[in-house]
Image (cartoon, rainbow, N blue to C red):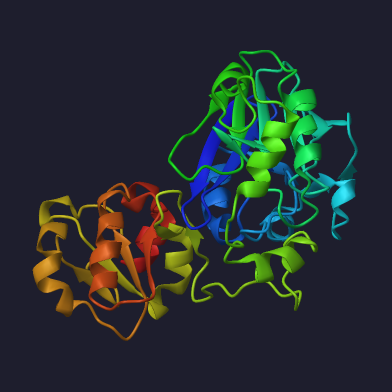
Amino acid sequence: MIFRQLYDDASSTYTYVLGDEESREALIIDPVFEQVQRDLALLRELELDLKLVVDTHAHADHVTAAWLLKQKTGCQIALSAAAGASNVDLPLEHGQEFGVRNIRLEARATPGHTDGCMSFVLSDQSKVFTGDALLIRGCGRSDFQQGDPARLYHSIKGQIFTLPDNCAIYPAHDYSGRTRSSVSEEKEFNPRVGGKANENDFIRYMKAMQLPHPKKIAEALPNNMRSGEPEDGKMPEEADWADLRITLAGFPEVEPEWVIQNQPSVTILDVREEDERTHGPGNDIDNLVSIPLGELHDRVKEVPTDKPVVTLCRSGRRSSLAIGILKKAGHEKVANIHGGVLEWPETGEKSLR
């Protein structure tokens, strides 16, 4: 199984990607709206086909990317039926099995933080995705949004702590940089529910907590009751000057074919050394500027500002570094040419010379 744990710094949210190595089908758990480009980049780079996006509950601290990912990929949306959200294709019930080809999860109802909280247990019980029900050395709060400390205590004890001791715990959040725990660790060391703590200890602990409400609660809750669909039902605005895609490294890219078809409307910045320019677009084509990467910092003012700039090198690696230099100099419409001249079509090269 392909497994990746991703992190959103703004909301301290973990997103999980699970993919089948054979079929390339994948599912995502707890995606964040603002991180869609990152998630799509990872799926594309790993050649995974997103079939399902699932949230552990209706979050109050961030907007889910479920609806947006469905618009982008055609995947289905899964969420606890108890959450009562719209746009859900697969309303999950306690004990229900779901997933993608060769990756199966069991949905376990773990209410107490919210009514619709669920934990998802991998079929071999090697991993459990606990959402906000159980965190690393902590748990979700129970002071709003249908919170009930007694229910949460029994959810943790009855549905999570009954898993094998070596079952790895992957929560929806961590605020201290911790990435995973285990059932045995939390049973022993969790300060709220571990050790010899009983229900009364837990309830009194939770009721004594005084936490401010999440900063994005007013936006997150209503949007998440629509599975992340914005109130106006519109897709977020994206750059439309080119057929852009963002890499997991964060660089905007275009394909060489797009550059060839749209060459008059862009400036091609070739950052190769002079002795490398034996392949790719010729120096005699319109809007081509050649500045070696090592000189770009000092010569960036030579790059025209009247058109978008696409950067080029032998393999598409060095030229990605030029993106940051150009942006720092004030260029807003910039992209790297994917694969560089190694991917430059021969027919395109000849037509441009």
Query: Horizontal placement of 37 versus 225: left or right?
Result: left
* Residue nearest the observer in this picture, 262 or 193: 193
* Residue nearest the observer in this picture, 293 or 120: 120
From this viewpoint, is residue 49 visible? no
Instruction: Residue 40 in the image: state x and y as whole percent.
Output: 58, 51
Instruction: Residue 124 in the image: state x and y as whole percent.
Output: 72, 15
What is the quadrant of residue 335 in the picture? bottom left
Query: Horizontal placement of 209 versus 349: left or right?
Result: right
Report the label total: 0
Instruction: Residue 11 in the image: state x and y as whole percent.
Output: 53, 55
Residue at the spot x=62%, y=48% of the render? 208
Q: Is residue 352 above or below residue 251?
A: below
What is the quadrant of residue 87 in the picture? bottom right
* Residue nearest the observer in this picture, 231 or 201: 201
Query: Horizontal placement of 124 versus 4: left or right?
Result: right
Residue at the spot x=61%, y=37% of the render? 171
From this viewpoint, is residue 261 visible? yes
Q: Looking at the figure, which quarter contains the N terminus?
A: top right
Q: Looking at the figure, which quarter contains the C terminus?
A: bottom left
Q: Is residue 170 above or below residue 28?
A: above
Residue at the spot x=72%, y=25% of the render? 160
What is the quadrant of residue 256 in the picture? bottom left
Instruction: Residue 97 in the image: state x and y as whole percent.
Output: 86, 29
Q: Is residue 119 above or below residue 197?
A: below
